[in-house]
Image: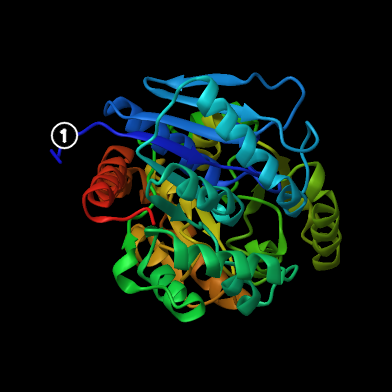
């Protein structure tokens, strides 16, 4: 098969709409990944159809996402946002409707690329029906989340499904070496089946904005500023970051901007607000709510440091986005942090989210923040390997390899 073969890919994102509101309970880094990857593959000439369920009665059936890339909504369950576990009973219906759509439109796909375990359930059936290879990216693993032991416990249904998919699919994309090891440890994944391809960043969207200008646009004063961006849930370790704020010396008492959350995060936000009052730092913390992705560079640029205090990340797109905007990152050693951050230069790594350790590195980052402009070019240069063009080329290479050497049985 010639290397330049153009692919026809059915991409699955069953529970999360790639054009949904980022920062809500089930819409985060995976949605960014799916959307950016599909668009970049489309620019390369490949045909990519992303299938998801209808999340709103106003959803159109087909959205054009760019050259050769489109999003297709199929009815499966209620035409509204529902908890991801509530999607599971509707997966057979989603698979049937997808097949009906394919037949009606006389479509043919070279392979299926599933994202997350719910999509992988559907992908496993399409793999059998179409006799094409099935490539999976889990993004997070239920067994690992349970091992971390923070937040709600993942059901055995998820663990069993992930184990079954690991066994039946032809290729697994892992974002890090650690994820590959977790797949082998918890699911007995064959090392030959797993390929490591990191996540990417849109360097055209995420660019530095002058700090003074960014702060003026956001109505911020000249105080030092720490930012958190992501879903508002216990696994993200936001409470540990808030505790770290109390360790900062009088010379470093910055404001903390918390970006993310939605209606489904209301209880967690209220818990964090009560914690802030108890810690007597409520006057230094602002909950910004959901911010549209194109507006995020303004927030990253206004901050002196971005903190990723998570207990667990499959990769950590936030770190890439922040560095692309010229803002250093303090992060726990989760996901791809050790491959993204140049310790002591573009940010700092901490072994875990113990508050005093976070505070120590935040203090160092704040002390160096006046030099961030000088380091901005260094930060962006370090991210060139993570351009979506490079990531999409790696994914396409794996797809072609599957079609030559893989099997759909």
Left or right: residue 288 versus residue 3 is right
- Residue 293 visible in this rendered orientation of the protein: yes
The front one of 364 and 181 is: 181
The front one of 40 and 169 is: 169
Q: Residues within 10 Å of mark 1 (few under 14, many from 20)?
A: few
As drawn, 349 above or below 387 = below
As drawn, 148 above or below 261 = below
| Image-quadrant location for residue 380 | top left
Quadrant in which the N terminus is drawn:
top left
Residue occupying the point 61% across, 79% down: 147
Element type at marker 1? loop
Residue occupying the point 80% across, 47% down: 264
Quadrant in which the C terminus is drawn:
bottom left
As drawn, 407 above or below 351 = above
The front one of 384 and 86 is: 86
Left or right: residue 259 versus residue 402 is right
- Image location of residue 279, percent across then percent down: 80, 67
Identify the residue under disc 1: 4
| Image-quadrant location for residue 170 | bottom left
Residue occupying the point 31% across, 49% down: 379
- Image location of residue 329, percent across then percent down: 45, 57
Left or right: residue 321 versus residue 374 is right
Residue occupying the point 74% across, 54% down: 85
- Residue 207 visible in this rendered orientation of the protein: no
The front one of 123 and 324 is: 123
- Image location of residue 211, percent across then percent down: 47, 36
């Amino acid at each position: 098969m010639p290397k330049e073969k153009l692919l026809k890919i059915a991409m699955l994102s069953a529970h999360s709409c790639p054009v949904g509101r980022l920062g809500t309970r089930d819409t985060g880094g995976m949605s960014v990944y799916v959307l950016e990857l599909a668009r970049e593959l489309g620019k390369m000439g490949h045909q990519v159809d992303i299938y998801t369920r209808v999340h709103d009665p106003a959803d159109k059936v087909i959205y054009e996402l760019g050259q050769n890339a489109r999003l297709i909504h199929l009815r499966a369950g209620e035409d509204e946002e529902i908890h991801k576990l509530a999607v599971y009973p509707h997966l057979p219906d989603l698979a049937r409707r997808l097949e009906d759509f394919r037949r009606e439109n006389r479509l043919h796909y070279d392979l299926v690329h599933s994202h997350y375990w719910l999509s992988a359930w559907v992908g496993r059936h399409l793999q059998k029906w179409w006799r094409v290879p099935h490539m999976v990216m889990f993004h997070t693993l239920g067994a690992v989340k349970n091992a971390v032991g923070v937040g709600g416990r993942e059901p055995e249904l998820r663990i069993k499904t992930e184990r079954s998919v690991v066994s039946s699919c032809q290729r697994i994309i892992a974002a890090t070496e650690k994820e590959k090891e977790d797949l082998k440890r918890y699911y007995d994944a064959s090392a030959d089946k797993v390929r490591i391809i990191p996540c990417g960043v849109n360097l055209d969207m995420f660019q530095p904005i002058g700090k003074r200008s960014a702060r003026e646009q956001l109505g911020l004063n000249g105080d030092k500023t720490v930012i958190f961006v992501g879903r508002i849930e216990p696994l993200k370790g936001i409470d540990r970051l808030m505790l770290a704020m109390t360790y900062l010396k009088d010379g470093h008492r910055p404001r903390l901007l918390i970006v993310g959350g939605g209606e489904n995060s209301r209880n967690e936000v209220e818990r964090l607000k009560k914690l802030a009052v108890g810690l007597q730092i409520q006057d230094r913390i602002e909950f910004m709510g959901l911010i549209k992705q194109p507006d995020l560079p303004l927030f990253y640029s206004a901050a002196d440091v971005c903190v990723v205090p998570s207990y667990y990340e499959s990769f950590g797109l936030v770190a890439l986005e922040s560095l692309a905007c010229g803002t250093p990152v303090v992060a726990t050693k989760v996901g791809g942090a050790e491959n993204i951050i140049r310790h002591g230069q573009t940010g700092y790594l901490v072994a875990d989210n113990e508050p005093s350790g976070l505070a120590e590195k935040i203090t160092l980052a704040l002390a160096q923040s006046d030099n961030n402009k000088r380091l901005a070019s260094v930060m962006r240069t370090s991210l060139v390997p993570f351009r979506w063009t490079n990531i999409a080329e790696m994914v396409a290479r794996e797809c072609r390899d599957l079609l030559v050497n893989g099997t759909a049985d």
